[in-house]
Amino acid sequence: MIYRKFNEIVPTPLQNVMGGVGTVMMEKLLLAPDEMLGKGRAYVRHTLNPGVSIGQHKHEGEMESMVILSGAAVHTINGEVQHLTAGDIIAAMPGDVHGIACEGKEPLVLIAQVLYQ
């Protein structure tokens, strides 16, 4: 069993993630790969303030899913632009190229999970 209280999760600032703009605050929800049974490399909560982005990047041998918890995002995947809000889900499959940015005046909060193919 894994159990963590909210106040035990420490935010880590990440600068210019994947060539993006600004500082993403990352909180590791599970410590990969051990707590993901060796099946993934990330299960995190990201907070992006207005103007912050995660740059375009390609997934090789893995897939990434994201659930928008709050705020609004512009997500570009394989050249297609999507506008996302709370409750929306996306998944970048192996070979997909994508990036995401906070859109609007409120912080964007999302949960991302990266699983091995």
Image (tube, rainbow, N blue to C red):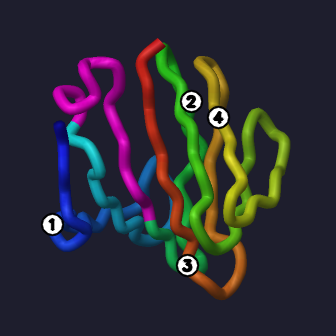
- Nearest the viewer among 49 and 7 is 7
Which residue type does callout 2 highlight? Lys
Question: Mark 4 or mark 3, which is nearer the start of the sequence?
Answer: 4
Residue that mark 4 sits on: 91
Question: Mark 1 or mark 3, which is nearer the start of the sequence?
Answer: 1
The span from disc 2 to disc 4 (Cα, nearest Å) is 12 Å
Residue at (27% x, 52% y) in the render: 28
The span from disc 2 to disc 1 (Cα, nearest Å) is 32 Å
Residue 84 in the figure: left or right of residue 33: right
Few, some or many C-alpha atoms within 10 Å of disc 1 (few <14, some 14-19, many ≥20)? few
Residue that mark 3 sits on: 107
Q: Is label 1 in a helix, a strand or a loop?
A: helix
Q: Position of residue 75 (x, y in %)?
A: 71, 52
Residue at (19% x, 73% y) in the render: 7
Q: Which mark is residue 58?
A: 2
Question: Mark 1 or mark 2, which is nearer the start of the sequence?
Answer: 1
